[in-house]
Amino acid sequence: MLDTLKNKKNLIALVGASNDPKKYGNKILLDLISKGYNVAPVNNQEEMISGVKSVSYTHLRAHETDSYIVCRLLLEK
């Protein structure tokens, strides 16, 4: 699994991405982008997260394939 995460060509769907700079969902998103990862923020309420078009969880589930990695943030309520 870690080798899959290290491959920057894979799409990482970050469930729990946030526009709030105080939340881990925003910090992790910006960190991954700054390191060159291909990240799709997943958020049902926001159209854009830190300048990146977000997708809804429903859309993500409808197009589920092996071509992306889903990272769910469990650190926040």
Image (tube, grey):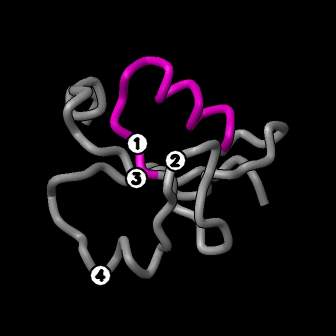
Q: Is residue 37 magenta?
A: yes
Q: Which of marks 4 and 3 precedes in the sequence?
A: 3
Of the pair 6 and 18, the residue shown nearer to us:
18
Q: Nearer the viewer, mark 2 or mark 1?
A: 2
Q: Residue at x 51, y 60 (%)?
A: 54
| Residue to which mark 1 is pinned | 39
- Find the distance from the CA under tag 3 to the CA under tag 1: 6 Å
| In this picture, residue 66 sits left or right of residue 17 | left
Quadrant containing the N terminus is top left
- Find the distance from the CA under tag 3 to the CA under tag 4: 13 Å
Is the Cβ of the residue at disc 2 closer than 8 Å to that at disc 1?
A: yes
Identify residue type, mark 4.
Answer: Ala
Q: Residue at x 37, y 54 (%)?
A: 70
Identify residue type, mark 1.
Answer: Val
Of the pair 6 and 42, the residue shown nearer to us:
42
Residue 52's disc is 2
Q: Which of marks 2 and 4 precedes in the sequence?
A: 2
Residue 62's disc is 4
Highlighted range, magenta: 26-40
